[in-house]
Each structure stands twice: as structure tokens, then as C-alpha cells.
Amino acid sequence: MKNTRLIRGLQAAASMLALAAAWQILSWFFPHFLFPPVPEIISRTINVLVTGSLLADVLLTAARIFGGLLGAFLFGGALALLIGRSPTIENFVSPVLTFFQGIPALSWVVFAIIWFHGIEFRVLFIMVMTTLPAFTFQILDAFRSMSKDLFEMTMSFRPSRWKLFRYLIVPTILPGILTAWKVNLGNAARVVVVAELVGATGGVGYELLKQQQLFDMAGAMAWTLQLVLFVLIVQQAINMIEAWALRYRAVSERAI
Amino acid sequence: MTAPIIRFDDVSKTFMRPDGRGSFVAVENLSFEIAPGEIVAVLGKTGCGKSTMFNIVAGLIEPSSGKASVDGHDPFREFEYFRGKIGIVFQGDRLMPWRSALDNVLLGLQILDTNDKQARDTALRWLARLGLSGHENDYPHALSGGMRQRVSIARAFAVDPNILLCDEPFSALDEMTARDLRAEFVRLVRQSHKTAIFITHQIGEAMEIGDRVLVFQRPARIAYEARLHADLTAAERQTVQQQIMAVLSQEPAPGA
């Protein structure tokens, strides 16, 4: 088990090293404003992390991602449970969510700039609107996969609604919630950059806009890597929560 | 004579077919009474409506017509009244995969708001009585079929219900395990003077468990009834068994 994890880690590291090597080779043949050397990118990335004012921009973006995801999760979770309980609500809400899914993130950015003044509210609105349908549909799917047998068994004890929710519904939808967070985290990281690029005065997206205006590829890469690192760290944290929360699952020794 | 604790008066239940084309009658004008402390085995071929009757007593479905009463109350409409009064052992173990054996037994006690320490002591005592000491923290996937069914029996007994409903609880087990569990089950029910309905499709099991055997014909109605006094001779038991077999052999196969 430990060996498998080590081998997996080494394989992942090897693939990233291969990517870095390919970039470094390109930097030998192209001007540095197009492909800056890897050491310079690493140095700029570390500089962002150790410079307080720059790190504040990274943390601001992280807070916006969390805020947006949390809003969409709470709102989407409530919607999913309402839809799951009532076909009428489903008939009413589902087409709207499907319609929302078709609206590009950039359109939400434009709508937010036209409708609202406050930068933070704009970003929150964009984040919630772009991730809400996915959260709702994923949690709804998890809710619908609830076992009828377990539902009847739990109901045989005559639980209150709160206890039914706590003892049956939450554990049933938890795997779906964790998957929804993992999937939406990547989406949110992409959307927040677009939102900050167009409608904010701080954050990773705003800094990327500045690097584009300066034609500074190393800077653009350094800021991009901040976001990638953030997503990787949070993904890892969710994986750890998942491993703990779903530890009851049987694991076959034979891989598929 | 003691007032019946379970009473069906001309109860019928009709279901719509899943494809919406027509309906089918699962229970038709079913009437019977069960006295407190009585163990009644309900016997019938697959699809004869035994489980529908079971679900009506459990309050999980409502009769289409007629009156079902348990302890003088309507089990469907007065759902809350039966909190802690009815325990169910289902055909499958219906254990929550995310709960350990101990936590599965605790479920009913938690729903009944039993004090934590008292609930834990009760659950541990029931697990021990059913031979599961040492497996308290095992998740269901780590237990054998017989052990899982023992946990589900412990879960039903732990809330100390007045009425026990059992829907073919040992049908998925091998004969040796089923025989041991059956003997244990009967001993526990008799010791605690509970009223029990035990659904089965095995004549031997019905005669071993029941004070009385009700044989159902499709749609659920009583085709034969026998009281099994303790002083019945082997020859008399043989006669009852032959009569039950004769009734069941008249019944066409499901779908015929």
C-alpha cells in the first residue's frame, strides 16, 4: 500500500519534471519573453509567496473561490433537497438551472459589472451563478441514489425530519458533495480569474492582467502557478477528508 | 379474552403498475387478529402480498380500503405514535454501510433520544447476546451475512419494541446459520413476551417459530390457519404440515 503510494508519487513527479524539461528546452530556442527559463519562473513564483503584498492577492483570490463555492454549495444543496422532495419544484427549477448552465462565465461577468457596483459582490455573484447548477445537480443525483431499503429501515424507527436528515440523508449525499467540491473547485479557479481579470482591482486575475500589459511571461506563469498550487492543495485536502469520511468503503485488493 | 394488538378489518391494497397501465390488487379483504405476546408466522408463495401486509402493519404504506389498527391506532396516519413501539427485521440486513456494527445498533436508540451512555450499554449488551462481541467496530462489509443479520436483529431488539415484524429475515442465509439464528430469535421473543409477525415462505420455519400459522393466497387473503400448541403430537404436526402444503400447491405460480 505504502509502496503503491510512493510509486504513484514518483510517477506524478516524473511527469511534472518532463513538462518542466520540455519548457526549458523551448526556452533555449525561443526568446525569453515567450518562454522564460524554468529557474526564473520558479524564482518569480517564490517571490509572490514571500512578498506580503503579492501573497495578499493570492489569498484574496482563494477567499473569493471559497466564498463562491460555499455560497453555491449552500444554495445548491438546499435547492437539490427541495427538488428531491417535490416534482413540482423540480419542474419549475430544473429548466432554469439548465438554462444557466448554457450561459458562458464571461456573460455572467458582464451582467455582474452592469448590475452591481461592489467588486466583492460582483465576484461572489459570478462564482455562485457559474457553479450553482453543477452543485445542485450533483447533490440531487446523490440524494436520488439514496437506498429505498435504508430509507424504509430508518423510517421504521419514526425519526424526526432533522434526525432523518442527520442519520440518513447527510451520509448518503456526502460522497456526492465531496465530488461536487472537487469538480467545482477547478471550475471556480478558472472562473474567478476571468471575473478578476475584467471586474476586480486585486487578486490573481488582476495580477495576470498586469503581466499581460507588461508582456511579462515569467510573471504570468508565476501567478498562474499560484492558482494551480492553490487548487492542488485544496484538492489534496478534500481527498484527505474523503479518505477519512468514506473510510467505511470496502477496497478490493485487485485493481480494475 | 385479551383485546387484539394487531387487527385487520377487510383491508385491501391496490397498486398502480409502474408503467401506469392499470393496477393490481396485492391485498384483498384481509381480516385477522393477533393477540399480545403471540408469534404469528405468515406463510405464502412469492408475490402473494405478505410483504404488503407487513408494510401496512409497519405503517410504511396505507391500505386502499378497510381498517388496519395496531395497539388501537392507525399505523400509517398515527406514524409518530409508534416511535419505539415497532421493531423490524427486514429480509436483507439493511445495515448502514457508513456505520460500524455498534453504530448500526445504536441507530434506533439515537432516534429515540436515549441517553448516550445508556444507549451504548444497551447496544453493546445486544451485540454480546447475539455473539458479536469483538466486532463492535467492524463495518458491515467486514462482517459475514449471518453476522450482519445478527446486527440487524440486535438493532430491532435494542429499542425494546412491543411488536416485532420480521420479513423473511433468514432467507438469504445458509441453513445452518439460519437454524441457529431462528432458535436464538424465538428464544429472545418468548423471553421478552413480544408480539411478533414472522413472514416466511418455508413451511418448516413457519411451524418452528409460530404459535399460529396463517397461509396466504394471492392476492393476500387467509387460505388456511392453524394453531400450533406446544402439546401437539408429531403426527398432528405432520397433518398440519400436509394441509399447508396442500393449500400452497393449489396456488398458481406468480404471473400465471
Image: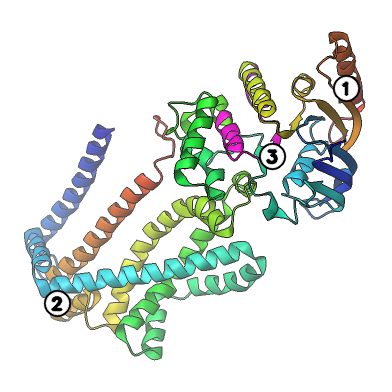
Residues at discs 2 and 3 both on one chain: no
**A220 is within the stretch colored magenta:** no
Q: Which residue is mark 3?
A: B162
Left or right: A253 in relation to A55: right
Gap in angstroms between the C-alphas marked 1 and 2: 91 Å
Identify the residue shown where x is 49% and y is 54%: A170
Single out the residue that lies furthest toward the front: B1
Gap in angstroms between the C-alphas marked 2 and 3: 79 Å
Q: Residues within 10 Å of mark 1 (few under 14, many from 20)?
A: many
Element class at badge 1: helix
Q: Nearer the viewer, mark 1 or mark 3?
A: 3
Q: Which residue is mark 1?
A: B244
Q: Residues within 10 Å of mark 2 (few under 14, many from 20)?
A: few
Question: Which amino acid, by three-letter code, is at mark 2?
Answer: Phe
Mark 1 falls within which chain?
B
Left or right: A98 in relation to A232: right
Element class at badge 3: loop
